[in-house]
Amino acid sequence: MRWIRFAVLVLLASVLQAGLMGMLSLGRPDIKPNLLLILLVFFASRCNATDAVITSFAIGFIADLVNPIRNVMGPRILSYGLFGTLLFDVQRVFSLRRPLYQGVAIFVVGSLTALVSYLLASLRTDGGQTNLLAQCLWQPLYSGILGPLLSLPVGWWMHMNKNSRHPYGRWPGPRR
Amino acid sequence: MRRKKINLSRGMLFTWGTLLGLVFLFAVPQRVCNRLQLTYAGVFRWPLAMGRSATLAARHPVPTGSASSKEYEQLLSNHRQLQNKMANLQAALQDVQQRNEQLAKLRGKPGWENVELRQARIIAMPDAAQTQLFINRGSEDNVAKGQLVVSLGDRDEIEGSCVIGTVSDVAAGTAKIHLITDQGSRIFVSVGNVNVRGIMEGRGDGTARITMINREHAISKGDPVYTEKQAGLDVPVITARVTSCEVDRENPFFWDIRVKPIYDVAALSEVVVVASASRPQ
């Protein structure tokens, strides 16, 4: 795992998410693609077991920093870490390198992380308004459509495209 | 010196990550989280500001001509203010149009074509007994003491507009209306057949009483009560209906007629003052 490249990529994604993703919003300001969610699914499906866990929690931390739910940090660290780790197990059964599966995975993980993050944030504070429909449905759907398109440049940057011996088949699993 | 590789199992990493999340969620004070977010925003303020500007530029139309961004913001602000003013004017216009339609309906009735009318809005309900009202027209609008006040009804039937009282006091911009049920109110009326004339006196309890009508006239419950023709108003206007008709105990040659107004005071919002029909008190 190239951690410096990973750090640059995640920071770049966070800046783009905070600054430029508003340009791609559809109808409402909160219906926009979630780049960090796309990266979460990408790394959880392409890294080995330990790296998948580390990248999931790290991306969750950045997501909490950039766009905290109800101004609380922690919910996304937990939800991204949990579902990123689970996704690594799932990709042993379903190849998440197929664009369709990847899109579906982004949508499902996005919905679940948004819901769990909202519930966790509710434990700390009960103030503020959150548009659950946009967070749990429209944003993951938008990200799921856009996500597979970004996997190629991200894979190129992380030098992960060449690792794939079976780009449309089952991945043999992490090397020990 | 050889670098020692740290081997951590997946489960251990997950536990540490979860603990980190729980610490941030429950143990780390809010100000520390705010500090972290501020630090991030400070470090990346330049790309974040650029992204924000680009997003705003993409959402708003690009200014044309040689106007600077400050002038453009000013123009946008003026545009919003003008839109608000326009919305208020449109609402006022709709209100005036609605009033004109009501007045046109009233003028469309026979006898009302040449009557000079002053439309007024009721501005207060001064007493609990609901025997007096205030309107937003006064001497500046040619409203004078003694003029008849008619309710504005939405319906086309005869009860749509009825006399509710007379102007009792006038100020520059407001006037007080004596309702027909107010104690001390006295109006010349006709009952049923317009040739049967009498005097209607308010009783102060939401009803009125008509005296001086000879028993030779047949009066029955439900008969309409009209105000007499007045100068400028050459048509009788309904004001009440008979609720009971008995022999007057003090003067057995006359009827003691009790009437109830057909208007609902609580539902009144607009009235019309018959400006040319001034009645001596």
Image (cartoon, helix red, strand yellow):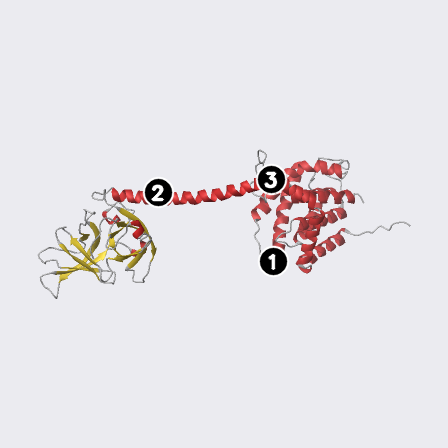
On screen, residue A157 versus residue B79, left or right, reads right
| Tag in front: 1 or 3 | 3
Residue in the foreground of this view, choosing between B209 and A34? B209
Q: Given the image, on which type of amino acid does mark 2 rest?
A: Gln
Work out whether residue A157 or residue B17 is closer to the camera in this orientation and state it.
A157
Q: Nearer the viewer, mark 1 or mark 2?
A: 2
In the image, are marks 3 and 2 on the same chain? yes
Image quarter of the C terminus of chain A:
top right
As drawn, the residue found furthest toward the right would be B1
Residue at image coords 23%, 43%: B114
- Is residue A40 visible in the rendered image? The answer is no
Element on which disc 2 rests:
helix
Q: Position of residue A100 (x, y in %)?
A: 65, 37
Across the whole image, how many numbered discs are drawn on residues? 3
Task: Check chain identity for marks 1 and 2: say if they share one.
Answer: no
x, y percent for residue A16: 67, 42
- In the image, B130 versus A82, the foreground residue is B130
Q: Is residue B185 visible?
A: yes
Amino acid type, mark 1:
Thr
Distance Cα–Cα, label 1 vs label 2: 51 Å
Q: Picture coordinates of residue A81 (x, y %)?
A: 70, 50
Q: CA distance from mark 1 to mark 3?
A: 40 Å
Horizontally, residue B143 falls left or right of residue B48, namely left
Mark 3 — on which chain does it sit? B
Q: Which residue is mark 3?
A: B69
Is A144 located above or below residue B273 in the figure? Answer: above
Residue beneath disc 1: A125
**Disc 1 element:** loop
Q: What chain letter is assigned to the residue under label 1? A: A
